Image: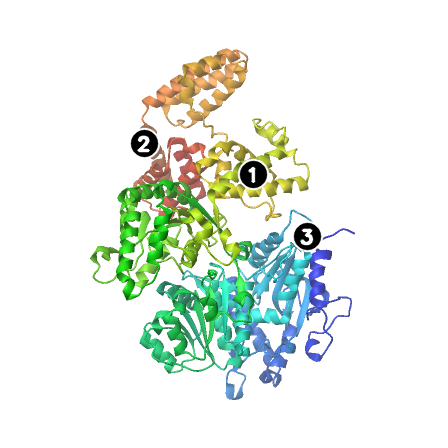
Amino acid sequence: MSFNEANTVEAFIRDRLAGSTNSPTVTPGLARQGGAISGLGWHFVGPTDLPRQSQEALVEPYLRDALIHLNPDIAANPSRVDDVLYRLRAIVMSARSDGLVKANEEFVAWMLGERSMPFGADGQHVTIRLIDFDDIEQNSFVVTQQFTFHAGKTEKRADLVLLVNGLPLVLIEAKTPVRSSQSWLDAALQVHDDYEQNVPELFVPNVFSVATEGKEYRYGSVRMPVDLWGPWRTDADGPQSMGEVEKAVNAMLRPAVVLDLLANFTAFATHKGKQRIKIIARYQQVEGVNRIVERVVAGQVRKGLIWHFQGSGKSLLMLFAARKLRLHPALKNPTVLVVVDRIDLDSQIAGTFYAADMANLVRTDSRKELSELLAKDVRKVVITTIHKFAEADGVLNDRDNVIVMVDEAHRTQEGDLGRQMREALPNAFLFGLTGTPINRADRNTFYAFGAEIDENGYMSRYGLNDSIRDGATKELHFEPRLVDLHIDQQAIEAAYAELTEGLTDEDRDKLGRAAAKMSILVKAPERISAICADIAQHFQAKVQPNGFGAQVVTFDRESCLLYKRELDKHLPPETSDIVMSVNSGEEEYAAYRRDRDAEEKLLDRFRDPKDPLKIIIVTSKLLTGFDAPILQTMYLDKPLRDHTLLQAICRTNRPYGEQKTHGLIVDYLGIFDDVAQALKFDEKGVQKAVSNIAELAAMLPSAIQKCLVYFAGVDRTLTGYEGLIAAQDCLPNDERRDAFASDFSVLSRIWEALSPDPVLTPHEKDYRWLAQVYESLKPSTGTGRLLWHRLGAKTIELIHENVHVDAVRDDLDTLVMDAELLEAVLGNPDPEKKAKEISVKLTGRLRKHAGNPKYKALAERLEDLKNRHQQGLLLSIDFLKELLALAKDVVKMERETPVEEDIDRGKAALTELFEEAKNGETPIMVKRVVDDIDEIVRAVRFDGWQATHAGEREVKKALRQTLFKYKLHQDAELFERAYGYIREYY
């Protein structure tokens, strides 16, 4: 018997959930009737034994039983079940009209007991319970397989579904583990692109879905993009295997964990002020939150330190922790304080809480307000900065159910401000969270937050390698630039040591002198001029083409102004802006004084890929807490170290679409001349936080050769299908193809990371050939998308630019005017081949002028020559000579004919076209339409644009924008005819 999806992964998970499925079918109430439980506590019911019709998303007999059992007011009058079921069915049906996320949010509110019905005495509203979260044995837990659902003529069949009281809370899609062409990603795409789109009703009660092929296990919430689906890992991760999937199933799919995730680890938030999204916690957030809650409920150890690497979701961890703590009955309505040490962090974290509609949330705006809130014993979630404890006078609140979560638990929290906070809240629980590992010399952080019972001082730890492995963050690369401009490292060390020695009154004068010394070194005019010229060149070559943004980190506020002035000499002024703190009376910086709302609007512009603002210049602001996934490159020219350095460079590591493979730090100061010295931490993995671009460049030749080895003996100059077939014959089976795909994936990641660095140029021909072979072998269906990944933007562009016949790069002018080349051609042993080549080029050249009568005679000459040659009236050598003579005449005509003449003919043709399109219902202003098209196409066109994929794309985009402006974008025929004229005349 062979291995397949049903008898391996699907059956494996089913048996882990329910134990042996050979036992007789059980009733849904068995769990609360004291029946034997096997597996993880789910009871198997075969699809034919489920009491439901295939068009019903809910198993209503199970749900009816639960409603009566859990609600005394319904038990007293069982007919009330129908009223509840009517409401729930309406929510299920609303998924198509209101959207799946909105329907899911409303259904979750019902499942969490946040909705009521008038079933009480005198019509009073009473809470309706669909699930018992306090005594979970009162619920029924059923697993079924091949769950068929019909919506109209559409039928979908889920591999496994977990039902709680008849509600389908979890859907599991499994793929076979023994076919290399399939992965968990295929299963996830099937859920996201097919099931959720075509049968959204099935997902209205959904908590999360699972995708696995028996090697990797991933989960996501409704409408979550599949690249954000996360793993559920255990402490001891092993290689990909059924055993690892079993660990994830055992840890995540227990009934108690599923209900915990529903009740405490899902949130609905407004994304960018518009779109409603559903969030489900990642496993490290669940672990961190539950350890905090367990410790507070136990009440024995009153502190703990959590290190989750930068960008892995600490704000959400605090959100889920605050919510679970506030709702926990054993804690008797606690106060939760979220303490940060900077205003920008305050804003970011508050934004996360507000977007997720956190109940009973207050953000303090003053020290006085914080003192009053604590003195009045307010029982809410309070967000404040550490600085608002500065004037705390003695004890503000001595309750023992005050829980404090301190973000970035080092720096100010360890000094006087941290001491004042502890004195103000003497009996509070104190939990420190940090995204940067604790410096081994910085032991007071462990003293302040670390508990003795925690191994290595951390109660929860999620490091850099974990974060990159799970896709929560990207790798960081660094690129040393302009070494001749690097300041002497010893001078930096000496000046920096003085700068960071302390900020006491006694040291103020000394610090001023140190800063002045450093300033002279860093702000030499020639240095700034050279660096800004290099930034502009680097940005235009490496950052802008990929659609990313950049951040320039300068020495001080004066440097911000100097850099802005220099950058404006190389880039349009709207490309960059400064974000800094400006005090009243500082007229030299007045242009950049913004309130919080104005600053946030500016940063939203930076996050918008369509906005011209692409570079933010800073010195202190936005180095911590700033979250903009579009930010990919940091130009660093400020001395930073340790926590501050790692926090700053991690601004660039947020995932952003498939094109962003890494964050890039361009180092102008020599900070990374000694990476280990710059990142002195107790975690060895942190030293891998940066990888040198030079190292990647060194890896490129061997990665190219590793891929070329597959095609030993193939003539790579052979074009057409003969060359492609010869290449494909070298990969005769799936094993060889997948091996090549794996090696090419490594190569393409290196290529994308380096692109468009000139170091690639010597290898471009080989890489283009390999990329085209790879593309020709890639499965055309949705299978195997994990291995045969989507290529990076630069690779796709490279392929596209070289697969069009028209995209011949040889210049005809050079060919016909070069006497030496002419002699070489005439002496060619194969004049027939060369004649065909020139004939093709001439045909393409004349096609561009097809509407101009001046070229009509030349086009007719070419056709006559081709006909005579085909009829045998013109020998090959004579045909070649005649073609060369014609080519000279074509070039001469092009030189004598102004480009404007062709374009004027184009405008005339477009005018005639839009006059035809005009009618009583569309009284368009023809001249304005044509002028707009003419203006925008002229702006984006370039010589030979018709022969490149990029050129065609830009011109089509420009045309669509203009037609959209005049509400003509829906007329496909009009678009195609207009584009034809533009291609011909422009």
Q: Helix, strand, or loop for circle 2?
A: helix
Amino acid type, label 3: Pro
Q: Which residue is mark 3?
A: 177
Q: Earlier along the polypeptide chain: callout 3 or callout 1?
A: 3
Closer mark to the observer between disc 2 and disc 3: 3
Spot occupied by residue 571 in the image (x, y as percentages of width and height): 31, 43
Foreground of the two, 486 or 287? 486
Can residue 146 be seen here? The reply is: yes
Is 268 situated left or right of 916 in this image? right
Q: Which mark is residue 904?
A: 2
Task: Tell me the distance, in whole angstroms, between the alpha carbons under discs 3 and 1.
Answer: 28 Å
Is 737 situated left or right of 888 in this image? right
Crowd around label 3: few <14 · some 14–19 · many ≥20 (10 Å): many
Amino acid type, label 2: Asp
The answer to whether residue 855 is above or below residue 346 is above
Q: Earlier along the polypeptide chain: callout 1 or callout 2?
A: 1
Q: Which residue is mark 1?
A: 703
